[in-house]
Amino acid sequence: MTAISTERGTKWLSGAGLRPTRQRLSLADLLVGDGQDRHVTAESLYASVQNAGEKVSLATVYNTLRAFCEAGLLREIMVDGAKSYFDTNMSDHPHFFWEDSQELMDAPNDQLEICRLPQAPKGAEVSKVDVVIRLRRI
């Protein structure tokens, strides 16, 4: 961790009212320390934290990602109903999902048009719409 990435991670956590514990700071550094948006799975983040030499369990990674989502720091994107990706870009935007490499990436928001959504059932409202466009290499 560099001083700048630690400062970014600390600001990110405190801005959401989360205490900057050692584990949270380690994960925040990997997620936002360089100022770039990214998409991670719990397993890929766990591998990155292990490569960085930090002592954080996979269970802690899962629990921390959930806490970050609940605090509004990350957005969870479900793919295949069984695999979750976590996105640091909280703006509304679509995603491309590469089926062969299992990589999730941002898609151009200005090229997406949703003209109409079905009416929500009585007593409900649409809270968000996730768009994941699956890609296959040709």
Image (cartoon, rainbow, N blue to C red):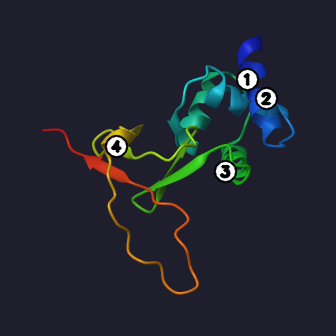
3D distance between C-alphas at marks 3 and 1:
18 Å
Q: Nearer the viewer, residue 8 or 128?
A: 128
Label drawn at residue 8: 1
- Picture quadrant of residue 43: top right
Q: Marks 3 and 4: CB-CB under 8 Å?
A: no
3D distance between C-alphas at marks 3 and 4:
21 Å
3D distance between C-alphas at marks 2 and 3:
16 Å
Q: Marks 2 and 3: CB-CB under 8 Å?
A: no
**Residue 44 placed where, x, y %?**
53, 37
Seen as rendered, the residue at the extreme top is 3
- Picture quadrant of residue 22: top right
Label 4, secondary structure: give it: strand
Q: Marks 2 and 1: CB-CB under 8 Å?
A: yes
The residue to which callout 2 is attached is: 11
Say above or below: 11 vs 97: above
Q: Amino acid at mark 1?
A: Arg
3D distance between C-alphas at marks 2 and 1:
5 Å
From where the camera sits, is residue 107 visible? no
